[in-house]
Amino acid sequence: MRAIVTGGAGFIGSHVVDALVARGDEVVVLDDLSNGKRENVTSGVTLVVADIRDEEAVGKAFADLRPEACLHLAAQADVRVSVLRPVFDAEVNVLGTIRLLEAAREHESRIVFASTGGAIYGECEEPATEESVRAPLSPYGASKLAGEEYLATYNRLYGSGHTALRFGNVYGPRQDPHGEAGVVAIFLGRLARDEVPHIFGDGTQQRDYVFVGDVARVVLAALDRSAGVFNVGTGVATSVLDLFEECRNAVGADVEAIFDPPRLGELQRSVLDTGLAQRELGFRAETSFADGISMTWESIRAEGEVGQGAN
């Protein structure tokens, strides 16, 4: 298969690229490198440095490759940035997605769109299904939901067969442990540098943490399925306190976290029902939480981010 991967130099996107290459597909990465890294792009893969909002660059990438599929993982993914800069968030996540939809329509390419579970469903007392009430609490969640609706509209209008995947909290190797990354990378990054991790609130907040290798598998599985919306997670709610304990165990660190005031608008519980993805895509999260944390820690160790006190 010929495939374009937007955001393919980033965390999730680079793992998707690796999975495509491993099965012999021809891949072009489209990434502006605002968050992605050149070194994340595997050897032999063409990297086009461009913004998905750039009509000329997107059009040229599609015209040159004539892809059968576009795996769309480029995004403005920081919730706090979306609150501070909602116009920028919408430009990237909505207008950028429309740009890709138009290019895909011209070349009859299918899109698999990386969406979000927690930011779309809001608070989840029970595991959210794809039919649960969608109640975004941030412009980021609203922009991702808008992207999904554009995909569905193009499917109805043109019979395109695009698919949206609503991810849980994805973690694993290559996630940035600096700045506003996922909490797993932040905890392990701080422990690696002999710094004290901070927990916002009392740590009882729960999330559905899913390993990036499992996510890459389901993205490829979605290529063989017609249009739909699917949750991608584990169906297991893990508290921040339990996550921190697992990170401490992996590192072998004896340190207590600092508790800070809770952040405004933060969800207390987000967990996904993945039954539909199991039935339709054959997806099941295979990586245990302990193994996933251990593999993430080993990747940080290998990158030399370890301080004197970490084992």
Image: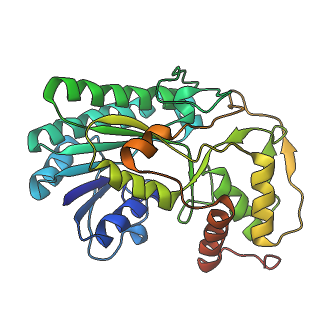
Residue 126 at x, y percent in the picture: 65, 29
Quarter holding the N terminus is bottom left
Report which quarter residue 80 is drawn in: top right
Report which quarter residue 303 is drawn in: bottom right
- Compared across the picture, whether 293 is left or right of 99 comes to right
Farthest front residue in view: 279
Residue 44 at x, y percent in the picture: 26, 75
- Compared across the picture, whether 125 is left or right of 46 comes to right
In the rendered image, the vertical position of residue 70 relative to residue 205, given as above or below: below
Q: Residue at x 73, y 70 (%)?
A: 192
In the rendered image, the vertical position of residue 118 relative to residue 174, given as above or below: above
- Residue 115 appears in the picture as rendered: no
Q: Nearer the viewer, residue 142 or 38?
A: 142
- Residue 152 appears in the picture as rendered: yes
In the rendered image, the vertical position of residue 113 relative to residue 36, given as above or below: above
Q: Residue at x 28, y 31 (%)?
A: 151
- Compared across the picture, whether 52 is left or right of 122 comes to left
Q: Nearer the viewer, residue 306 or 220?
A: 220
Name the colour scheme.
rainbow
Q: Nearer the viewer, residue 117 or 131?
A: 131
Residue 120 at x, y percent in the picture: 52, 29
Quarter holding the C terminus is bottom right
Q: Residue at x 47, y 24 (%)?
A: 131
Tell me how many marks there are: 0
Q: Residue at x 37, y 42 (%)?
A: 280
Report which quarter residue 66 is drawn in: bottom left
Residue 203 at x, y percent in the picture: 81, 42
- Compared across the picture, whether 86 is left or right of 209 comes to left
